[in-house]
């Protein structure tokens, strides 16, 4: 196997990642390879603003792009037309009641310009394990008992690292994101990490932060008391129309 021009991680899942300043400029943010997807390694990565992103057949690749795409939790934008539709919506939102369904739906959702998925079977298993430990969370959108959208990610302290979202019905992912943002705003969490900029997230109000600023925020917020364990009881059931 051809070695990449980046360091391979040590076998110990608690071992340190290279400094973010050593990440490649092309491809932007590629920092390291190898290691594993154990809870210890993943939480260590997120605490340092690093996330895994790779395809089947590749080694695990670890990224910290510059700049970093984020949402202010009070800055998610829904169009006036979509808000009008929401006012008549029968949908409801819950948290942590269907995590495995959400991540599986994200894995199989078609993405424009992409063949296959970066959410491999190993990634699904790893994030379900994080969820069972109380570190990964989902916000789900239901039409009755049918799952129509969702978003999942990792929470450390008062920082939320978004991973992926999906829609089974048009607008499902927008409602999931808006619902997550509303919850986090109410809890005093200022940011949702969205990793790498794309046209869809820009349309919803994402902004770019220099990596140095993003990492400073991650360092500050991840050290604060968070909300451990499942969020189900704390969130209850939210009417989607309340997000309009």
Image: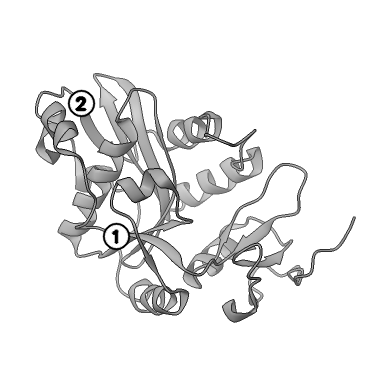
- Is the C terminus in the top left, top right, bottom left or bottom right quadrant? top left
Question: Which residue is at 32% across, 35% downward?
Answer: 140
Residue 230 in sight from this viewpoint: no
Residue 227's disc number: 1
Q: Nearer the viewer, mark 2 or mark 1?
A: 2
The secondary structure type at the circle numbered 2 is loop
Q: Residues within 10 Å of mark 2 (few under 14, many from 20)?
A: many
Image location of residue 10, percent across then percent down: 75, 71
N-terminal of the two: label 2 or label 1?
A: 2
Rendered view: 141 above or below 16: above
- Disc sitting over residue 91 in the figure: 2
In the rendered image, the vertical position of residue 1 relative to residue 65, given as above or below: above
Q: Quadrant of the N terminus?
A: bottom right
Residue occupying image coordinates x 55% and y 67%: 64
State the image coordinates of residue 198 (x, y, percent, origin top left).
45, 49
- Looking at the picture, tell me which residue is in the foreground, 149 or 114: 114
Q: Is residue 24 left or right of residue 5?
A: left
Q: Is residue 147 above or below residue 217?
A: above
Nearest the camera: 77 or 102? 77
């Amino acid at each position: 196997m051809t070695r990449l021009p980046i360091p391979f991680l040590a076998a110990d899942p608690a071992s340190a990642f290279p400094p973010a300043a050593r990440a490649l400029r092309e491809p932007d943010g590629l920092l390291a390879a190898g290691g594993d997807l154990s809870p210890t390694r993943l939480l260590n990565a997120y605490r340092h603003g690093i996330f895994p992103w790779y395809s089947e057949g590749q080694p695990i690749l670890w990224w910290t792009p510059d700049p970093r795409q984020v949402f202010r939790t009070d800055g998610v934008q829904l169009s006036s037309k979509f808000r009008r539709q929401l006012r008549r919506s029968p949908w409801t939102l819950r948290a942590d009641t269907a995590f495995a369904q959400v991540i599986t739906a994200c894995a199989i959702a078609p993405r424009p310009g992409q063949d296959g998925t970066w959410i491999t079977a190993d990634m699904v298993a790893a994030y379900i394990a994080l969820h069972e430990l109380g570190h990964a969370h989902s916000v789900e959108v239901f039409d009755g008992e049918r799952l129509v959208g969702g978003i999942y990610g990792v929470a450390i302290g008062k920082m939320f690292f978004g991973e992926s979202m999906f829609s089974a019905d048009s607008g499902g992912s927008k409602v999931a994101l808006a619902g997550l943002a509303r919850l986090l705003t109410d809890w005093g969490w200022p940011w949702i990490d969205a990793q790498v900029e794309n046209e869809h997230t820009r349309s919803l109000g994402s902004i770019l932060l220099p990596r140095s600023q993003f990492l400073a925020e991650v360092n500050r917020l991840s050290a604060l008391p968070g909300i451990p364990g499942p969020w189900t009881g704390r969130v209850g059931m939210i009417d989607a129309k309340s997000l309009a």
